[in-house]
Amino acid sequence: MIALTMIARVVDGLPLAASIEEDEQSGRDLQQYQSQAKQLCRKLNTQSPDRCTLEAGDMDFHYLIAQGICYLCLCEASFPKKIAFAYLEDLHNEFYDQYGKKVNTAMRPYSFIEFDTYIQKTKKTYVDSRARRNLGSINTELHDVQRIMVANIEEVLQRGEALSVLDTKASNLSTLSKKYRSDAKYLNTRSAYAKVAAVAVFFITLIIYLRFWWL
């Protein structure tokens, strides 16, 4: 289920359009999630990762940044991540085509609230089980969900850190990991050379010994 969708301008977090799906069966209060979504959009900047998943208990926030606009949705944690990001990309393509030239001049919140009609229609396409099976063949290169940064929404909001800081930390960890792998490879290579050298020395010594022994 896609419970909430929000589109916001990255430079100042101004919400441009939104759609909320009331979940009467679970009795889930979406007001808290909506508040978190707004706080998150205000924390984004041009240095933030362009794709990210933020865990919120049994729900996940997924967002995509493109052309200075953030497309965010709230889904159940069991909802396929690949489908969620495909949904966000679909919204981006249509929203930017309709309102891309007007985004920078928007002054009031939800200036493009009429886009909710397209959001609702698109949401049904991606939530419908039969449609999801058809979407299962999405190009994995375009939607490499394994490389998308994952964080916890509460930690991000409580720490007060911009997501660009988390992205920097993730990049640093990636750099350290690459350095570790490089060092390990270097040590393994040295070890292999040392073994080869030891064998070579043994055979050379043996040849010299046998040569002098039979003279």
Image (cartoon, grey):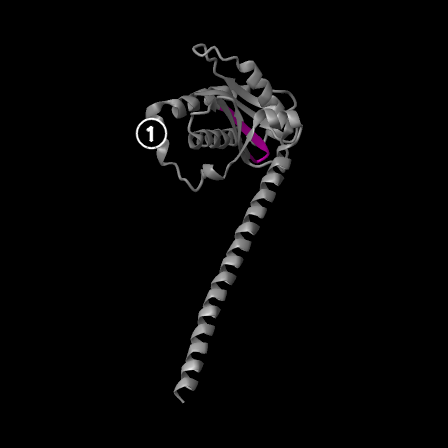
Within the magenta stretch, is there residue 189?
Answer: no
The magenta stretch is 66-74
Residue found 57% across the figure and 31% down from its top: 69
Q: Quadrant of residue 164?
A: top right
Residue 11: x and y, percent?
65, 31
Q: Which residue is mark 1?
A: 133
Residue 131: x and y, percent?
35, 26
Specify the amino acid type for callout 1.
Arg
Q: Front-most of 116 and 143? A: 143
Picture layout, residue 25 above or below residue 38: above
Main secondary structure type of the part rendered in magenta: strand
Picture layout, residue 9 above or below residue 184: above
10 Å crowding of disc 1: few (<14), some (14-19), many (20+): few
Residue found 61% across the figure and 44% down from its top: 172
Q: Quadrant of residue 141?
A: top left
Residue 128: x and y, percent?
36, 22
- Count the numbered circles shown: 1
Picture quarter with the N terminus: top left
Q: Front-most of 138 and 60? A: 60
Picture layout, residue 166 above or below residue 183: above
User: Would residue 99 be visible to someone looking at this image?
Assistant: no
Residue found 64% across the figure and 36% down from its top: 165
Q: Is residue 201 left or right of residue 9?
A: left
Residue reaching furthest to the front: 213
Q: Front-most of 16 and 209? A: 209
* Helix, strand or loop under label 1: helix
Picture layout, residue 153 above or below residue 208: above
Q: Quadrant of residue 25?
A: top left
Residue 38: x and y, percent?
60, 22
